[in-house]
Image (cartoon, rainbow, N blue to C red):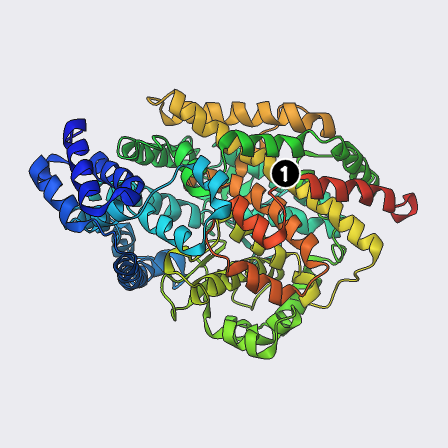
Amino acid sequence: MMINEHDRKAVIRNLIQQHGEPQQERIVRGVHQVALRWRKEDGSPDVFRQFCIEHFVSNPAKLTILFERFLKNLESLYGNLHRVYKDFNWQLHVDTGEMLPVDNLFAAWDVFAHVTDDFFQTKLAFLVLLNFSLASLAEKTKQGRGWHRKRWAELRLAEQFADRVPAAVNLYRTTAYTQAEKYIYSYNIFMHNIIDKNGQRLFPEGLRLISHWDLRDEIKAQYAHQDGLPRQEVIYLMMQRIIHQEIPRQVINNPQVDWEPLSNRVFMHGTQKPMPSEAEETRRYETLLNIFRAEQMLDSHTPDTPTLIARRFERDREIPETEVETLLQTILRNPLLKNIAGLIEKRLKRPLRPFDIWYTGFKDGSGYPEEELDSIVRERYPTLAAFQSGLPKLLMTLGFSREKAEYLSQYIQVDPARGAGHAMGAKMRGDRAHLRTRVPAGGMNYKGFNTAMHELGHSVEQVFSMNEIDYYTLEGVPNTAFTEAFAFVFQSRDLDVLGLTNRTPENEAWLVLHNLWQTMEIAGVSLLDMRIWRWMYEHPDTDAAGVKETTIALAKQIWNEFFAPLFGITDQVILAIYSHILYCGMYIPDYALGHIISFQIEDYLKHTDFAREMERMCKLGRLAPGVWMEQALGSSVSAKPLLTAAEKALEVVSADSL
């Protein structure tokens, strides 16, 4: 540390003498915050002392002016840099045709990389840290309920400069994530090119599915077909080939070859002529390892959160890791799951298979064959432009007034996704959020519409929590799980929008069971994501082969502990198929938390105005999760509402409903 205790105390005494005892707590905290981050290149102890004496602000009115100046300028900075980021990543994120090598170079450039360095070099970061207090997770959790909104906004301002990460490290990290995105977004399988042992094609022409999202959703779609099981089994085998890295490289994103997954042989498309092939081997796990290496480079620069695990839970989620793990295991160990598994077996009239973690037959409208849903969606939205122009009507169907629906629609732009789909919010008022989903050449299909509904939830939240927020640094929601919760709320209404649901008490009961089953599935994947990262930090010198071996072993371990008692099958690896594990840096627990929170939101919204209350909740902004939940719903994050509702739902459903 450049500034020793003697020098810090001397500055503190000087400032207290100048500004008075009432400012002591602010002075002590501010001086320590600056000293902890002061480096040799920032100046001598005398420069440190002079800076603190000159820039500490005690007058409340002047402090407010300082605060507002930063909010105004940061919105301009981050908002415009985000626009550049969006433009530079356009070809990576949006399906504009073939990507060029230069597109990867633009995407790899981090426009935000030098912001932190520059703010510390100009001492603007020190000015914030001297005058606005950081807070520990314990302080935010215990004391935050009594803070006014401006105090929260001041905290979020200070947190912009809590970590001093060099630009070179930021650039390296961005490159790793960009390369991972490129790998994932290009991982397509041409399903018409999948053949069985007799050379028969199992899927329609033109069906191109990205792993894992579309492969999973195709398994879901096949439940509506009496003859869907063989296709589900083939997709499940394909998933295992991907996880074990036995899939031939030649099959990935290549329409020129046919693949017979059972024998793992590759043929020239449309012929029975075998061709040489090579397994992918470890590329999948090299992608994850590269992300790990990038995050390791940050560790020494974030001493309060010296691992990605700590950064994710203590800084990003603001929910302790142990608390999240307990919540996940509360779901996974619940005895109600055994009852639900029994109901699924009776409905399917067969023993459960591992891919039945994605069973959708409880959801109202799930009996519609996907081809029929595709036709309905395509008729309504023949093009992406039709979906864009149809947004006001869609939002009105969800309960928003015409005025509010048109307001939201003008701030949401719909783009064709290169990957499975995602939403990208704005970083300044007046800019547009981007909703991205896949749309085949013949028009939007049900998979794309279902994804679009999920991303619409994100986009509506982003518009409200940016444009309607009172303080810029409070824009957004407490953490990613909360925006996922709103996305799930919208996604669950996809068939409502299409006019295909019948909300009877019994259907509502089945929907609760569907919610618990899908929460169980993603809770298992979340545990896997967490345990992989723990293992990598315990084995920092591992190679891709070690990551592969461990991921597969942990997937089996979690399956055997939580899923085998329900399915009667051991040593399954299916939980490891999720692409998020590879390129999102332990993101998946946000999905599990999002499911739990979305059920709490749904339960609350049953007795209120959906549109009005969603807007109110989004405008609460980025408070701590517990504080937000208390103000939004009058409760804390808990699995109890979902489990209690599931217990009642099992009492409602009757044997003849099967």
**Given the image, on which type of amino acid does mark 1 rest?**
Glu
Identified at 45% across, 46% down, the residue is 187
Total marks in image: 1
In the picture, measured across the screen, residue 14 lies left or right of residue 318, that is left
Would you place residue 553 above or below residue 649 in this image?
above
Q: Position of residue 51 (x, y in %)?
A: 13, 45
Q: Position of residue 276 (x, y in %)?
A: 43, 36
Frontmost residue, 304 versus 111: 304
Identified at 25% across, 41% down, the residue is 27
Frontmost residue, 344 versus 241: 344
Identified at 72% across, 46% down, the residue is 514
Can residue 249 be seen here? The reply is no
In the picture, measured across the screen, residue 518 lies left or right of residue 99, that is right
Q: Position of residue 52 (x, y in %)?
A: 16, 44
Identified at 53% across, 37% down, the residue is 577
Q: Which residue is mark 1?
A: 521
Would you place residue 522 above or below residue 472 in this image?
above
The quadrant in which the N terminus is found is: top left
Secondary structure category for the residue under label 1: helix
Frontmost residue, 206 versus 496: 496
Q: Quadrant of residue 34?
A: top left
Q: Residue furthest right?
A: 656
Frontmost residue, 575 versus 214: 575
